Amino acid sequence: MGALEFADFDKRAGTRMVADAVYGHAPLDGQEVALHATLYLPKQRRRRPPPLLVWIHGGGFRDGAHDQLQIRRLARQLTIEGFALATPEYRLGAGAADLSEGSRARLDELERMPVAEGAGWFSGAAAIAAAEDLSRFMTWLEGVRDEIGFAGRPVLGGSGAGAVTAFNLAFLAPWLGFERPDPAGILSFSGGFAWPELYEAGKYPVFALHNPFDEKLAIGSIRALSQLDPRLELLEAWEQEHGLLRVHPKETKPVTFGRIRGFVERWTAA
């Protein structure tokens, strides 16, 4: 693994980035593809290492990108306040043939498990492949900890399919046999989890923002988990737009991003 190449993110603010570092390789449609991640880091010469949020993009496991505008805005709001952000890509549209041998060996057992209502579309091979990739990423991230210099355990976060992947990384990946460093908590924006039998209530703190009338990803699975888990805080907001970070359209940026920073700081310090 080569040394990371740092560049300016916002020169005036002194923030830095590592763009499109290769963190692994995986099969997709009969080919081996490289998997990339971008890291956003605060100004150097701080008194303590920065807390780190791993943000997973959405897109229904069909599209989306790890460097899309929403993520760059999040990176700016985090890094200027002393936080670090890591944004990995993952395989899109993967099929069963693209999964690891270990995952394929457990597919039949997984398919026999009850699936949460409305979770059928995010319980297939594409979702499993994303969890495999994020397991690789978390292991790679731990390997470059000294170069980045982040504090504590990373927090997982995402919107839509990205939030689904955060849950899958926390609860499905270990069941499939993938080792990865433990996260500090989960931030879910319009997310869910398909397999209630695999969920371990109380294992991680979770904050979930979800519109109860979301038609892209129904609230049912996350609402059911919130009733089982006292450490899962669910905020139901009927004005929230699918995958967005704000509770309602008029919420200000300091409130929206301050909420995220608050959870990340608290959980990484625990």
Image (cartoon, grey):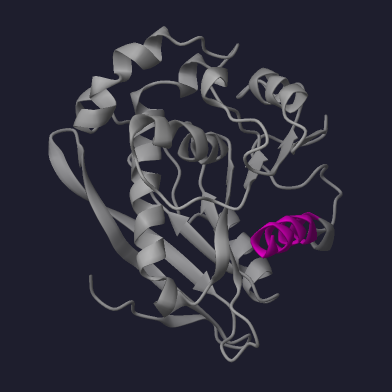
Does 59 sit above or below residue 36?
Answer: above
Instruction: Tell me the quadrant of the picture where the C terminus can be found.
Output: bottom right
Residue interval drawn in magenta: 256-270
Judging depth in this view, the residue of 252 and 130 nearest the camera is: 130
Q: Can residue 106 be seen in this view?
A: yes
Q: Is residue 262 rendered magenta in the image?
A: yes
Q: Where is residue 141 in the image (x, y as percent from the top left)?
A: 40, 62
For this orientation, the residue located farthest to the bottom is: 45
Does 115 sit above or below residue 26?
Answer: above
Q: Residue at x 45, y 11 (%)?
A: 113
Q: Is residue 102 left or right of residue 138?
A: left
**Residue 38 in which image quadrant:** bottom left
Q: Position of residue 1 (x, y in %)?
A: 23, 70
Q: In this view, does 2 lie to the left or right of 62?
A: left
- Majority SS type along the magenta span: helix
Q: Where is residue 189 in the image (x, y as percent from the top left)?
A: 66, 40
Q: Is residue 232 left or right of residue 21?
A: right
Q: Is residue 203 rendered magenta in the image?
A: no
Badge count: 0
Q: Residue at x 69, y 57 (%)?
A: 267
Q: Where is residue 30 in the image (x, y as percent from the top left)?
A: 13, 34
Judging depth in this view, the residue of 60 and 1 nearest the camera is: 1
Q: Residue at x 40, y 78 (%)?
A: 147
Q: Is residue 53 visible?
A: no
Q: In this view, does 174 lie to the left or right of 261?
A: left
